[in-house]
Image (spheres, rainbow, N blue to C red):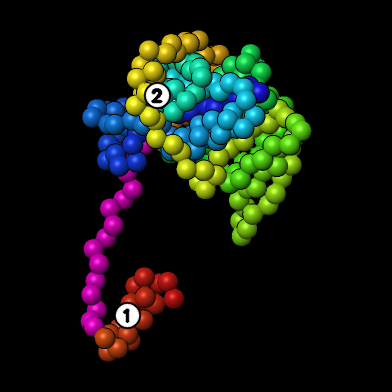
Amino acid sequence: MKIAVCINHVPDTETKVKIGPDGKSIDRAGVNFIINPYDEIAVEEALRIKEKQGGEVIALSLGGDTHKETLRKALAMGVDKAVLLKDDAPRDSYSVALALAFALKEISPEIVLFGKQSIDSDDAAIGVMTAEMLGWASVSVVVKLDFAEGNVTAEREIEGGHENVEATLPVVITAQKGLNEPRYPSLKGIMAAKSKPIEEKQAAPASNRAEVVEMRKPAAKGSGKIVGTGADAVPELVRLLHEEAKVI
């Protein structure tokens, strides 16, 4: 079985974001980048599928040379092959999905795994958009995955509960927290990943359909007000919530 997993190189969740000089992107100076946490879950699931079903796991990432760091993390975890789709230009979700779809058509995997969303743009769109461009079935926000005779059975989160979905291969899956617990790369895996080649391909061209026109931080919160303590403060609190805050 050929399994592809698409991963992104994103700022660490502890990053204190600063707006860049262009006012449309973040200032990358001093920012630590990591593999997108949801994509790490996707990598782990790809490796578990390989361990059960056999085959090959191929990791893909779209971006500049800095993405090699994240691809090497995937190789250290146990991925067989890494492919960098090179493009330093800003892309929206549509053009990222289109480039990934072109690359995946060449690879022809039976299953493609994504994280449910990337923590930088947070739109949860690229996995399902890629599936639509490929004309394949997709199941999103998956917390459990099983295989049987060319079919997959997936349990996915929905509002207020879970649902079970069956799909035939090829299929695109987007991984949610709870699907697995990603492994730590072994020392042997880390050392081997340093010497493994990363195949480089030029990403398929595409025109963006969305543009960032401005990036700004949320407005600072206003100062709080202490109206008193104990039960005696309740009438004044109610009055302020009604007359000033206008929430009741």
Residue 243 percent coordinates (x, y): 36, 76
Decide if residue 102 is in sight here. Answer: no
Residue 184 higher or lower than 190, as above or below: below
| Quadrant holding the N terminus | top right
For mark 2, what is the residue?
A: 189
Q: Residue at x 62, y 32 (%)?
A: 52
Quadrant of the rendered image containing residue 73: top left
Residue 156 percent coordinates (x, y): 63, 48
Q: Residue at x 73, y 36 (%)?
A: 148
Residue 159 percent coordinates (x, y): 61, 56
Q: Amino acid at mark 2?
A: Gly
Q: Which residue occupies the foreground of this view, 137 or 42?
A: 42
- Furthest toward the bottom, the residue is 232
| Real-space Cα separation, disc 2 to disc 1, in angstroms | 60 Å
User: Does the magenta-highlighted stretch encompass residue 225?
Assistant: yes
Quadrant of the rendered image containing residue 204: top right
- In the picture, the disc for residue 237 is 1
Q: Secondary structure at mark 2?
A: helix
| Quadrant holding the C terminus | bottom left
User: Does the magenta-highlighted stretch encompass residue 220?
Assistant: yes
- Span colored in magenta: 215-229
Q: Amino acid at mark 1?
A: Leu
Q: Residue at x 24, y 71 (%)?
A: 225
Residue 198 percent coordinates (x, y): 44, 13
